[in-house]
Image (tube, coloured by chain):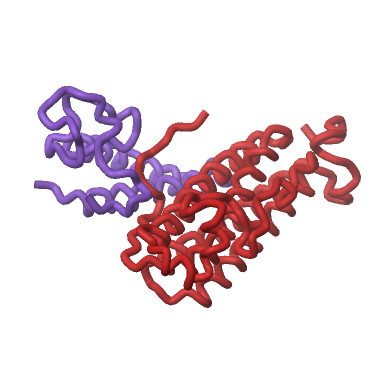
Chain colours: A red, B purple
Amino acid sequence: MWNYEKRLQFPVKITRPCPRTASLIISQFGGPDGEMAASMRYLSQRYTMPCKEVGGLLTDIGTEELGHLEIICAIIYQLTKNLTAEQVKTSGFDAYYVDHTTALWPTAAAGVPFNACEFQSKGDAITDLFEDLAAEQKARTTYDNLIRVIEDPEVREPLKFLRQRELVHFQRFGEALEKIKSDLNAKNYYYFNPEFDKQFIRK
Amino acid sequence: MADRASMLQEINETSFMVNDLTLYLDTHPLEEAALLQFQKAMEKRKELLKAYAEEFEPLTMDCVCPDTNNHSACCTRYAGQKHFTWSDGPLPWEGGSI
């Protein structure tokens, strides 16, 4: 189970609302490489992971991603606080506003709603860990794209923190993959599925 | 009078050490230097959370103690009354401004 802690992992204090920026950052909430897809991916994959340490790592990273989802939502919330109707009309936020006012709803920046097809839970440890490594890099690229076009330091600082965490998670997933491989036949890591053909796993 | 923002900042920094070391130790469970750092950061985090809850609102359910929480009566509708202190303080996404 989970316990809530009443603070953000990294503080968000935005004093200059900007709905246009919010409509870009929302992709890291409900977009293809966003934090919701990240946490759901790891927290779904962990049950069948054949190695207990890797199941534990997926739990801990999946949990941190929930905290990142909260940081992203706090940024969007603060960027769209106390908007006037005029600001809605001129900021490119009007299409989102029609359906959600200023509430948080998971969607990509281009308007594609969050979909479980954004991530995979394949039931093969090698396949899933490569998916996780790729996911961290895709999220890192998305943060790079945001940081390149956003100038406000109050928004950039939490985004830079989140970008760094993608790198750390990539490193840890790389170590997890090595750990899984150490239990397999080094002559052919792809000979069987370690989550299904368990009789082949070295004890 | 303790400063709310600086105490929270110290909790964030110490908790981040715990978060980052947790992931490191998940893949390096026998590394002694990391284990020692983890233990130190965790002890400090517990002390900071306790001190913060005495002065302000509890940040975790384990810190909820209506008799000792929030001496400064900061951001509560029930100052001076025994009450459930979990709802004291600002919501985290409000930006920490009171």
Say which residue appears at 25% left-offset and 40% top-offset: B89
The residue nearer to you, when weighing B23 against B85, is: B85
The residue nearer to you, when weighing A102 against A147, is: A102
Tell me: A192 left or right of B56: right
Tell me: B60 left or right of B3: right
* A197 shown above or below A166: above
Say which residue appears at 38% left-offset and 58% top-offset: A81
Tell me residue A96's x, y (percent): 55, 59
User: Does residue B20 appear in this view?
Assistant: no
Tell me residue A183's x, y (percent): 76, 41
> Which quadrant of the structure image shows residue B72?
top left
Tell me: A193 left or right of B3: right
Tell me residue A106's x, y (percent): 58, 51
Which image quarter holds the C terminus of chain A? top right
Say which residue appears at 87% left-offset and 48% top-offset: A190
User: Does residue B85 appear in this view?
Assistant: yes
Among all residues in the image, which is located at the extreme right? A191
Say which residue appears at 65% left-offset and 41% top-offset: A54
Badge count? 0
Tell me residue A184's x, y (percent): 81, 43
The residue nearer to you, when weighing B84 against A39, is: B84
